[in-house]
Amino acid sequence: MRSVNDGFRFLLELTGLVWLGYWGWQAVSGPVGWVLAVVVPVVFATVWATWIALNSSMVVSDPWRLVLELAVLGGATAAAAAAGLGMWAVVYGVLVVVHLVLTFVLDQRRPAGGERRRVAGIAVGQREGS
C-alpha cells in the first residue's frame, strides 16, 4: 500500500506542475504568460525537490514538511481554481488531502533514513552515507 501511495504522490506532483503551468499561461497574455508557465512550475519543483522529496539530503521534518506540502500542493489547487478549473481543483484538493492522511496512516512521514541534523534551525533528515 505504501508503494501505491508513493505512486499516487508522484501523480499529484505531476498534476500540480501542470496546474501551475496552466495558471501561469492563463494569468497573463503574451510572453509574460509563457514565462510564468515555465517559471512557476520550476519553483514548485525546486521547493519540492529540496525540502519535501524523501530522497533529498535536506528533507524538512514535520510539522514544517506538512506545512510546505500543504503550501505547494494547496498552491497548485488554488492555481487550478484561479485558471477556471473549479471542479478539477476541488477533485485535486480532495485527492491531496486523502494522500496526506494516508502518509500518516501508513507511517510515511519520516525522512528517508539516517540521522537528524539542523539546517537554518529546522531539523532535517540526513541521508545515510551523506
Image (tube, rainbow, N blue to C red):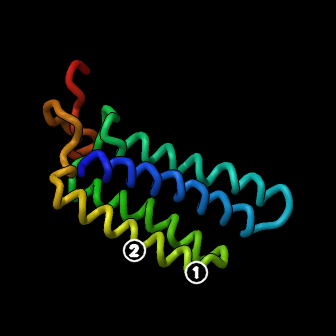
Q: Residue at x 58, y 77 (%)?
A: 81
Name the kind of residue labelled 2 in the image: Val
- Residue 110, percent across and down? 18, 46
Residue 83: where, in percent of width, then height?
A: 66, 73
Up-down relation of residue 118 to residue 89 (above or below): above
Q: Is residue 21 left or right of residue 50?
A: right
Sequence-wise first label, 2 or 1: 1
Secondary element at image label 2: helix
Residue 21 in the image: x percent, y percent? 65, 57
Disc 1 crowd, CA 10 A, few/some/many (<14, 14-19, 20+): some
The number of callouts visible is 2
The residue type indicated by label 1 comes to Gly
Residue at the image point whose x is 33% and y is 69% from the top: 97
Q: Residue at x 38, y 48 (%)?
A: 7
In this figure, which residue is indicated by the disc labeled 2? Answer: 94
Residue pointed to by mark 1 = 86
Nearer the observer, 15 or 116? 15
